[in-house]
Image (spheres, rainbow, N blue to C red):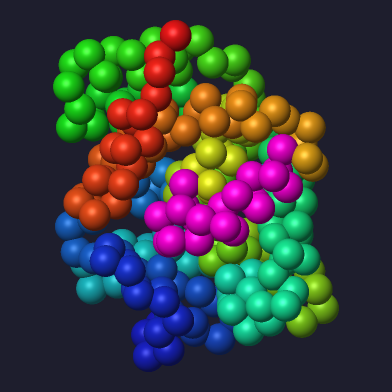
Amino acid sequence: MNLTNVIAERPTKTVYRDGDRCIKLFVEGYSKANILNEALNQARIEETGLPIPKLLEVTTIDGRWAIVSEYIEGKTLQQLMDENPEKKQEYLEQLVDIQVEIQSKTCPMLNKLKDKMNSKISQARLDATTRYELHVRLDGMPKHNKVCHGDFNPSNVIITDEGKWYVIDWAHATQGNASADAARTYLLFCLSGQYETAKRYLDLFCLKSDTARQYVQKWMPIVAASQSVKENEKEREFLLNWVNVVDYE
């Protein structure tokens, strides 16, 4: 494999292009279970018919795990927003349309969103009372089985020159409540400092999915708590504000 053309770098992985293949190479010692789960998610989402890069193989390179997928030529929605700020609203609408399309699918073999959230809340560095209240709130939320991306943002949507879209990075995919996924996207915009974009995103999602804003907001503290387990202290401080300002019923 040719590992000279780097297209993305993250703390736990480096992504390369090798011709018509995309190679996601993880750092040494990265969880084998997480890598295999990501590959399995991708294979299962492929079967829904959604446009995503095809999984080609899971392998090791010099003792490090790698996921090899089809390379999709194009630009991310984030790149297009940055290059064409006058079209940002148009791209934001496209983002929501794609998310609603994803959530129209079911994939019974995916892990359940509620199970993942409960596990994350248990891991969160929160006091026992707050964790209990979050578990109770989560348990009371309606159970759905829609496909949820888990990290849906403009950087994970590729638009080809022909205008076709593909969604990448399915490591966090689950089946569950669409409003929880929308709450995460909203918080991701906020975490990147895009507060006005976050508001416009949420308005569009609620309009296009016929969902009450208050319903999505009820998911915010749950999603914020689950997101706070990532080892990022600056993000954690911001997210805990969302957890702590909630008036529990």
Q: Which residues are magenta?
A: 187-206
Where is residue 195 shown, x and y percent of the image?
51, 56
Q: Residue at x 51, y 74 (%)?
A: 22
In front: 106, or 21? 106
Classified by dominant secondary structure, the portion drawn in magenta counts as helix
Q: Residue at x 53, y 47 (%)?
A: 186
* The quarter of the displayed image where residue 1 is located: bottom left
**Is residue 33 found left or right of 101 in the rendered image?**
left
**Is residue 40 found left or right of 4 in the rendered image?**
right
In front: 143, or 200? 200
Against 6, is 236 above or below? above
**Is residue 66 found left or right of 177 in the rendered image?**
left
Is residue 100 among what the camera can see? yes
Q: Is residue 104 magenta?
A: no
Is residue 60 among what the camera can see? no
Please identify the quadrant where the C terminus is shown.
top left
Where is residue 144 shown, x and y percent of the image?
63, 21
Q: Residue at x 75, y 57 (%)?
A: 93
In front: 76, or 200? 200
Against 40, is 225 above or below? above
Identity of the residue furthest to the bottom in this view: 4
* The quarter of the displayed image where residue 212 is located: top right
Where is residue 148 shown, x and y percent of the image?
59, 39
Q: Is residue 202 magenta?
A: yes
Where is residue 54 shown, x and y percent of the image?
62, 61
Q: Residue at x 65, y 51 (%)?
A: 201
